[in-house]
Image (cartoon, helix red, strand yellow):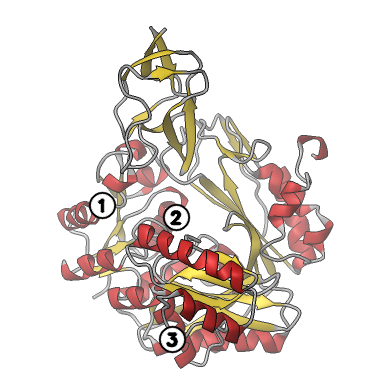
Amino acid sequence: MAQILSPLPGTFYVKPSPDEAPYKAAGDAVAVGDTIGLIEVMKTFIEVKAEVAGTFSAYVAEDGSPVTAGQELAEVAV
Amino acid sequence: MAIKRLFIANRGEIAVRIIRAAKDLGITTIQAYSEADADMLAVKLADEAVCIGPAKAADSYLNIDGVVAAAIEASADAVHPGYGFLSESADFARAIEQAGMRFIGPSADTIERMGDKVAARQAAEAAGVPVVPGSKGRIDSVDDAVEVAAKVGYPVMVKAAAGGGGKGIRIAENEDELRTLAPQAQQEAAAAFGDGGLYIERSVTSPRHIEVQIVGDGERAVHFYERECSLQRRRQKVWEEAGAACLDDETRENLCKAAVALAQSVNYRGAGTLEYLYEESTNAFFFIEMNTRIQVEHPVTEMITGFDLVQEMIRVCGGAPLSVSQDQVKRSGHAIEVRLNAEDPFMQFMPWPGKVESLKIPEGEGIRFDHFLYEGYQIPPFYDSLIGKLIVHGKDRADAISKMASALEGLEINGLKTTVPLHKALAKDPGVASDDFHTQWLEPWLDAGNLSPENM
């Protein structure tokens, strides 16, 4: 199991916009460079990208929750 | 009814600024804060502080019901909205009024009227203030857009009739482009504001952004002269001056008089700013919009006029008449403000919410630093990146620029990246020195590599 960590402190979002589906769902394939979420930091949105390939397990951080740099956001089975 | 207990519904440097002004007026201050802001400077400085919700602004600083309830609970008799957040929300102002408190700003009706571009433009025209030639009202069809564009002449700018902040703005060079762009702008406006109405005007070439500060008491209004704010990146002001050295006295006088006429015609109360585009080649100015709040860059105006605008807006919104007449407002020297953002200017201005390890603030005559920093303060990542404003006052523009350059040398904020290097580069740029710029100047200047670590 690999962890995807937040590169920055901010607010974590699992969806590109409120009306859309989450970037990943359990069982989805994950390739290196796939966007799995967004971090909103000082009104700027930064994409969080997977650094490993595998199968998406789950989001660990909640959508819309504050996160710290280095905090676990999601898990990927490799 | 003079205000006794002021609730501050904002954060950061403007909250600190409001507390200072209120204290000087002998008013008790109650600072609102989110869970992420419990240790911010304004909380420490205020007489009382109230938590209004979680870090997310939508659930705290932008939550109208929550903020109003907190102000009532704290027995506030007035609410200062600062800038941003709810400062230009007519619904918020109305809720404050209905709860029997004073809103430190204009009436909800005035906010509503001046917040709508079409209505604001009609008010300006009625007061004899020049506006950019454009559509008489909202436009709902592409054919109507084409007809108006033919009259005002290309290039034309297409905007959403509702909303602001640059959303939905497009420039069409000819009819073909307009026919392609107008439906897109309609869609975007409908998605963003729930209203697909458009508004079309002549696009002014290489415009300068010049704005006039006014304060009104509901009957009478005075101006505090103009500011020049053309140095912008992504429509955000970066460097602001008072006054605008590019104006001759007659144009300045007309610009300021027009602002007062408009403010008085809408019975304006509080501090407000009328924004204009100025076309240097034709010496023409056009009203674009009115901001019905105190602005980030108000200190440059305070420096050249000697008036405390935040105190004045609190007084008039408490029901007092203006404390100043127009002939008492004199301008002296030249002032410059630079916005310090927690961003890395060498990395596409990436936000950098670090911890302030050490802080050295420049001091001296004509130097002012408005901020909310202290050593050991962790800047939260949830809000705007503005951390402070360095302001200088010189005897003329050249003196102010040189003072800014030395004040920047004396400023040290360790532990984070800031936009200080950008301002150091601007302060020694020949284009800035010769006042030869406009609103489309800074981004190409950055793209051309004028700011790089090697140049510092």
Residue B295 on image: x %, y %: 49, 64
- The residue wearing badge 2 is B14
Disc on res. B358: none
The amino acid at mark 2 is Ile
Q: Which residue is mark 1?
A: B63
Q: Earlier in the sequence, mark 1 or mark 2?
A: 2
**Residue contact at pointers 2 and 3, CB within 8 angstroms:** no
Q: Residues within 10 Å of mark 2 (few under 14, many from 20)?
A: many
Count the labels in the image. 3
Quadrant placement of the C terminus of chain B? top right
Does residue B248 appear in this view? yes
- How much space separates mark 2 and mark 3, taking CA atoms? 32 Å
Please tell me whether mark 1 or mark 3 is closer to you in this view: 3
- Assign a secondary structure to mark 1: loop
Q: Is residue B405 visible?
A: no
Could you tell me which quadrant the N terminus of chain B lies in? bottom left
Do the residues at discs 1 and 2 belong to one chain?
yes
Measuring from the top left, give residue B93's x and y in whole percent.
27, 67
Question: Is label 3 in a helix, a strand or a loop?
Answer: helix
Q: Residue at x 38, y 58 (%)?
A: B192
- Relative horizontal placement of residue B117, taking residue B434 as reference (left or right): left
Q: Secondary structure at mark 2?
A: helix
Image point (51%, 60%), residue name: B296
Name the residue located 26 percent from the left edge and 63 percent from the top edge.
B92
| Residue kind at label 1, given as amino acid type | Asn
Rendering coords of residue B96 (x, y %)? 22, 66
**Residue wearing tag 3:** B122
Residue B339 lies, with reference to residue B413, above or below; the image says below
